[in-house]
């Protein structure tokens, strides 16, 4: 009853298409002159150049964002932990009250 049974070779279900026949074709090579390489268009937009002051502002802003997001995530984790602990304490108190009520 608990021994695994090996499946037998199943018969195919559905239609099976015969393999496609590939006919060889002749390859004809043409000698063409290569096309000239395309020239990259000149951008009309000004490029952004970072000064040392702007770079410090970017690094400081990024650090502030990381610290704020980290503080929010840690506070959310702490809120979940406190909620879980309070629910556990409530469950123990309720269990004790119910057990003491049944003893009377």
Image: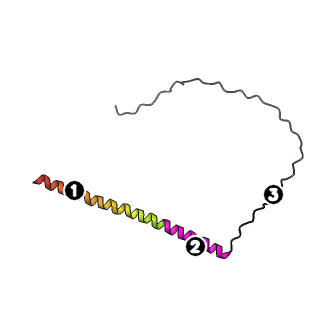
In this picture, residue 32 sits left or right of residue 47: right
In this picture, residue 46 sits left or right of residue 98: right
Q: Which residue is mark 1?
A: 94
- Label pair 2/1, CB-CB below 8 angstroms: no
Q: Which mark is residue 41?
A: 3
Instruction: Give the residues drawn in magenta, as a range.
Output: 41-69
Q: Earlier in the sequence, mark 2 or mark 1?
A: 2
Tell me: residue 4, above or below residue 71. Answer: above
Q: Residues within 10 Å of mark 3 (few under 14, many from 20)?
A: few
Q: Residues within 10 Å of mark 1 (few under 14, many from 20)?
A: few
Q: Which mark is residue 57?
A: none
Q: Which residue is mark 2?
A: 60
The secondary structure type at the circle numbered 1 is: helix
Q: Quadrant of the N terminus?
A: top left
Q: Earlier in the sequence, mark 3 or mark 2?
A: 3
Residue 31 spot, x, y in % from top left? 89, 42
Q: Quadrant of the C terminus?
A: bottom left
Residue 50 spot, x, y in % from top left? 68, 71
Report which quarter residue 76 is drawn in.
bottom left
Tell me: residue 55, above or below residue 19. Answer: below
């Amino acid at each position: 009853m608990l021994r695994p049974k090996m499946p037998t070779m199943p018969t195919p279900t559905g239609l099976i298409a015969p393999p496609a026949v590939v006919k060889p074709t002749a390859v004809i090579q043409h000698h063409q002159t290569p096309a000239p390489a395309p020239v990259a268009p000149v951008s009309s937009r000004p490029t952004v150049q970072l000064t040392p002051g702007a770079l410090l502002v970017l690094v400081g802003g990024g650090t502030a964002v990381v610290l704020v997001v980290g503080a929010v995530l840690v506070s959310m984790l702490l809120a979940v932990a406190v909620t879980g602990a309070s629910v556990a304490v409530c469950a123990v108190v309720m269990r004790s009250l119910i057990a003491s009520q049944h003893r009377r």
